[in-house]
Image (tube, helix red, strand yellow):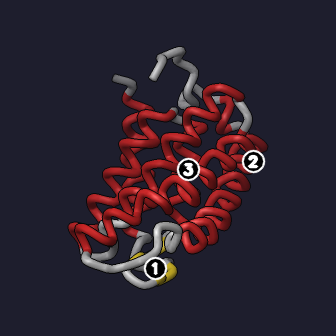
Amino acid sequence: MNVKKLTLSALLIAVGTMSAHLVYIPVGVAKCFPIQHAINVITAVMLGPMYGLANAFLISLLRNMLGTGSLLAFPGSMFGALLAGIVFKMTQRKSWAALGEVVGTGLLGGIAAYPIAKYLIGKEVAVFFFVIPFLVSTLGGSLIGYMVLNLFEKSGILKGPMIQKDKQVI
């Protein structure tokens, strides 16, 4: 285990969990959370897809335990985090990681939220009901994450040993 990666992961989970009550967009039973999407992009680039998926799951779990999230936080973050990490690993481009987050959360997560809303929460919604709100949330958050990564790159943080460099296959 890489202590630096675990430490950064824990810091990002803490930021994601603690900022959940400050900035979210209520959309019916969903609480769209742009900071989560920024964290997903940052984690994808700096730590890789598996950390991204784990961080998204843990932030969603903690938000639900603390009452600042809904069950829709899981598909609304995990698909984007994983896809952003996979796309970055394949392309090594921050912009593609941000696009992976948008597609993963906005489209895949938005559609995956339907059965959760219908069967677990008991809300009758259309299959694509969450796609637009998730897209709005992830577009803003992914852009923020991309800009933060650019700042990290200019300051030299992305050249350090913490960025994902292992050739581990998913």
| Sequence-first disc among 1 and 3 | 1
Instruction: Name the amino acid, label 2.
Output: Asn
Q: Is residue 56 above or below residue 82?
A: below
61 or 102, which lies in front? Answer: 102
Tell me the number on the disc at residue 22. 1
Would residue 167 be visible to someone looking at this image? Answer: yes
How crowded is the residue under tag 3: few (<14 C-alpha within 10 Å), some, or many (20+)?
A: many
Check disc 2 and report the residue beneath it.
150
Q: Nearer the viewer, residue 7 or 104?
A: 104
Amino acid type, residue under disc 3 in the picture: Gly
Say which mark, if any, is on residue 104: 3
Q: What is the x, y in percent for residue 13?
A: 39, 53
Identify which amino acid the numbered label 1 is placed on. Leu
Q: Nearer the viewer, residue 20 or 132?
A: 132
- Location of the N terminus by quadrant is top left
Q: Which sits earlier in the primary sequence, circle 2 or circle 1?
A: 1
Q: Nearer the viewer, mark 2 or mark 3?
A: 3
| 6 lies left or right of 164 | left
Distance (Cα) linking label 1 and label 3: 24 Å
**Point 49% across, 34% down: residue:** 49
Residue at horizontal 46 percent and vertical 83 percent from the top: 26
Residue extending farthest to the right is: 154
Q: Is residue 67 above or below residue 102?
A: below
User: What's the distance in space between the residues labelled 2 and 1, CA to CA?
Assistant: 24 Å
Q: Quadrant of the C terminus?
A: top left
Q: Dot 2 lies on which element?
A: helix
Position of residue 53 measured from the top left corner of the image (x, y, whole percent) = 41, 42
Image quarter of residue 72: bottom left
